[in-house]
Amino acid sequence: MPARSARLIAGAFILCLCACANTPQTRSLLESSPGDLPRHGELVEVPFFPQDVFQCGPASLAMALNAADIPVTPEILKPELYLPQIRGSLQVEMLGAARRNGAIAYQLAPELSDMLREIAAGTPVVVLQNLALGWYPLWHYAVAVGYDLDRAEIILRSGLEPRQILPMKTFEYTWARSGRWAMVALPPGKIPQTAEPATFIAAIGAFEKIGRPALAQNAYTAALKRWPGNLAAQIGVGNTAYRMNNLSAAETAYRQAAQDHPDSTAALNNLAQTLADQARYEEAVDAARRAVSLGGPLLRTAQETLSDIERRMRR
Amino acid sequence: MTRQYSHFMRWTSRVVIASMLAMGMPQQSAFAGIVEADQIVAHELAEQDRARINALIDREDVRAQLQQKGVSASEAKERVNALTDDEAHKIAGKLDQLPAGGDVFGLIFTIFIVLLVTDILGLTKVFPFTRSGRR
């Protein structure tokens, strides 16, 4: 091959590498790290499960769940998670399996600083990496348990390595290729350091569907403590009480919600339903009428509740 | 576009569509007459979902493919913004269900998004969860 074209190809290759070489979050973290973020941290007590072939998903989730005091092994999780066709585990299944085993699963915002904040707050973070390249992917789940901003390193429980130390840049390359996917699994009642209210309420909502209302209620109560007066959390506290057939507790929660949020159709609608279930039809109809008069996207639900109560009254 | 390439695209599209249809849609169970807590945050989350879909439309490969079909990115985004909360949420939910990480082969992901956008615009109707355009 003539030297000139070889140089040209090498140049093009390096150009391509440079174009791909982009670790903006590492750079901004190292250049100006937030003052409230500790310089380093490591969760040494997070247990390690070495993975079997292709079993990085079950192993990683088992480590995160054990750290949340939920004793499971990768073998227990394997049937819930592992898909032989893709020789791996899907992200949605990781979140779902965490919930089914009693943890609130929360997907973090795709920010390296959020990941470090969770570690600093004592929560290990399950991450998805693509260890190879976009067109030749090698998907891998690992658990981030530590970091050091001064040494620019991330510490992971990964594969067969209980303490893998990766340069922060290398970590970001592999993580960015997965769309910066990261999740935490926490016992209901604990809230991720970086949680956003709407997203976190939705995460509790997903957990609620596994049918353990007492645990879901712990989570809503904690959310209400973190974000006082949050309407969705108030409704959640009421709904979980309603599910456990504790109608007076549900009523209290809905009344508080209706008082704090006079324009909430949901609070009045649920209050009306709860009163009707206690055969207090006059009060129920009153609440339901007020819910209907507020209108909004829940208008149809409120109308149905009202006509349902009126039907029950006539009986 | 060469014949082999378009054949490949057609084949890949079919695989994508089949796998999307096979995944089904999660149904919420609800107590009659009770508004769920996650219904209350649905609107706020749908706004985030719209932003996410719009960001995908901005991807260069998606833009190029759309242009080829005579669709401008701004037109596509306008339509995304007009999706109902529920639609935006279902569509964004599909993005999370793409096999391990989304772009197993970048192309599959691109095709998925292009089909998604043309669906939203009413040029195609491949996904059960999109409402075809009314224009």
Image: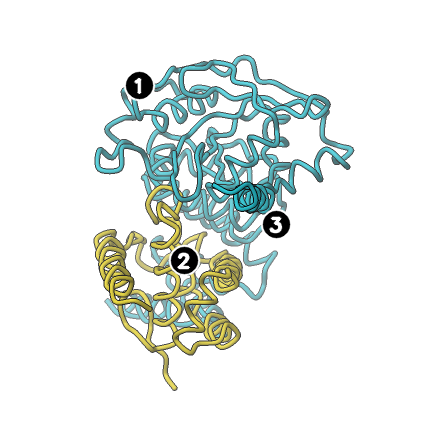
Chain colours: A cyan, B yellow
Compared with residue A146, is residue A2 higher up or lower down, i.e. above or below? below
Check disc 1 and report the residue beneath it.
A52
Does the residue at mark 2 contact the one at mark 3 (Cβ under 8 Å)? Answer: no
Chain hosting mark 1: A
Local packing at callout 2 (Cα closer than 10 Å; few below 14, some 14-19, many 20+) is many
Asked whether the beta carbons under mark 3 and mark 1 sit within 8 Å of each other, the answer is no
What x and y, as percent, mark residue A201? Answer: 49, 47
Which residue is more in the foreground, B131 or A212? B131
Q: Which residue is mark 3?
A: A229
Discs 2 and 1 share one subunit: no
Q: Amino acid at mark 1?
A: Asp
Where residue A266 appears, as percent x and y from the top left, is: 47, 61
Chain letter behind tag 2: B
Q: How many residues crowd around disc 3 within 10 Å: few (fewer than 14), some, or many (20 or more)?
A: some
**Outermost residue to the front:** A2
Residue A110, can we see it?
no
The chain letter under disc 3 is A
Label 1: how many residues lie within 10 Å, few (<14), some (14-19) or many (20+)?
few
The alpha-carbon separation of the residues under discs 3 and 1 comes to: 46 Å
Of the residues tagged 3 and 1, which is closer to the observer? Answer: 1
Q: Residue at image x 40%, y 58%?
A: B35
A237 with respect to B90 (left or right): right
Q: Is residue B72 above or below residue A54?
A: below
Q: Amino acid at mark 2?
A: Val
- In screen coordinates, is A87 left or right of A283? left
Quadrant of the snapshot with the C terminus of chain A: bottom left
- Which three-letter amino acid code belongs to the residue tagged 3? Gly
Query: Residue A79: in sight, yes or no?
Result: yes
Residue identifier under label 2: B35
For label 1, the SS is loop
